[in-house]
Amino acid sequence: MARKRKGPVFVNNLEIIDIAEKGLSLGKTSEGRVVFVENVAPGDVVDVRVVKMKKSHWVAFPIKFHKRSTDRVEPFCKHYDVCGGCKWQHVTYESQIFFKEKTVRDALQRLAKVEPKEFFPIIPCDETQYYRNKLEFSFSNKRWLTKEEVTEGVSNLEDVLGFHKAGAFDKIVNVTHCYLQGDPSNELRNTVRELAIEQGISFYDMRANVGMMRHILVRTTTLGETMLIVSFHKNEQDVIKPFLDSILEKLPQLTTVYYCINHKVNDYVLDLEMHCYHGKGFIEEQLGHVKFRIGPKSFFQTNSLQAKVLYDVAVDFAGLTGEENVYDLYTGIGSIALYLAKNAKHVVGIEEVEDAIKDAKVNMELNGIDNCTFYAGDVRKILTDEFAQEHGKPDVVITDPPRAGMHPKVVEMFLKLEAPRIVYVSCNPATQARDIAVLSEKYDLIKIQPVDMFPHTHHIETVALLELKS
């Protein structure tokens, strides 16, 4: 029951019954009000303080636990409370995948209002730690302080390298060990920080927009290759060159080192010019029978081992015999297109990011694949009647859109094309279900397969097969 005071609103004895997006969990008041709560788990009974009130729901945080869920476990990372990255570390992995599968089922029932003929159990991740191949870290001359440290008067003036505190652009959590990316990621990050401090290079001040050290991006592969990208605020070669040389002296196993100059107020580097300082300029990854060359700006699935699992599902759902004309939409660097090319007659890939298409063409040549054609541009604008006339009606359409799902005009074009099969790969069950609802005018949802790519987070990938109605 909710009770009001002059100031805050509290809800007592709230039972947490489900999970929600962004690592939150869900409870309902006795009046039926939905309350999203952070840092709790289904099965908890808590008193909460409401911090945001909307017509459809409230958002709150726990202030007292009356009962703790049997699905709770002790988080394994010491940064868990402040980092905000792996928000489900306090829940058993078995419970995580149960609720992720439930999220997909609920989205289909609530938004698509269709039932698949087959719903396969979620495929869990064999590696629940050190599974990412890409991480980014930011420099700051001020460290995030806990409430206890603030109370004790601890100074936040410290040169740190780590993650942004959730919801705070200028607060950096100093990460000493991260369980997301395997070797040599932790050694590399800590070495970079130590060398910058030793050499007296200033760390960035996010409010004043001053300081030399901005940001690093680390890519690793299962083939043992590592790429480091260092972002500096100014192009001061008398600082940059000795610093990068010292990194290579400490970590000679680095495959490729890039640097860039970032004058902007944000850490985004993929729109900046990249300068290759050391190595061959790329790293390589192997997924099954396909080798991928990955550059500094390449988009690539961030869990290499589970990406193969995902692509195997997509190929299986596509049901190719070697005679099909395939469209691969939102193809990225052509990952799925190249992976299934040997099973198709021809594959046409479309991707908005021009650099990604350049990577796709390089990787096509690298693997000796000659039955793919790639186009750079907005899928909505390229996928037209004229395009279909030029390239032939597709027998199978593969689509792997961003979290926002497909543009309505793309969905309309699907209904016009009437491809016999659509394989819809999604990282957002809600937008996938929304698009499936529209496609159900002409398509049956045959089967769906959830795949967990990101343990200890709320993210879930889903592969759906739709077939044209008779």
Image (cartoon, helix red, strand yellow):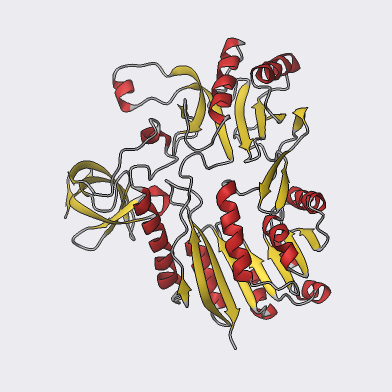
The percent position of residue 185, horizontal first and vertical second, equals: 56, 30
Residue 267: x %, y % from top left? 60, 34
Q: Is residue 98 above or below residue 248?
A: below
Q: Is residue 167 visible?
A: yes
Say whether residue 95 is left or right of residue 266.
left
**In the displayed structure image, the side of residue 189 where residue 282 appears, left or right:** right
Foreground: 446 or 442? 446
Name the residue rendered at 20%, 53% in the picture: 14
**Most distant residue in the front direction:** 289
Q: Answer whether residue 412 is visible to the viewer in this image.
A: no
Where does the image place residue 440, in percent across and percent down from the top left? 54, 79
Q: Quadrant of the N terminus?
A: bottom left
Q: Which residue lies at the image location 42% right of the left edge and 49% below the top edge? A: 22
In the depicted structure, whether residue 174 falls above or below residue 377: above
Looking at the image, residue 4 lies above or below residue 435 = above
Residue 209 coordinates in the image, percent (x, y): 59, 25
Name the residue: 72% across, 48% down: 291
Residue at the (46%, 67%) spot, across then down: 120
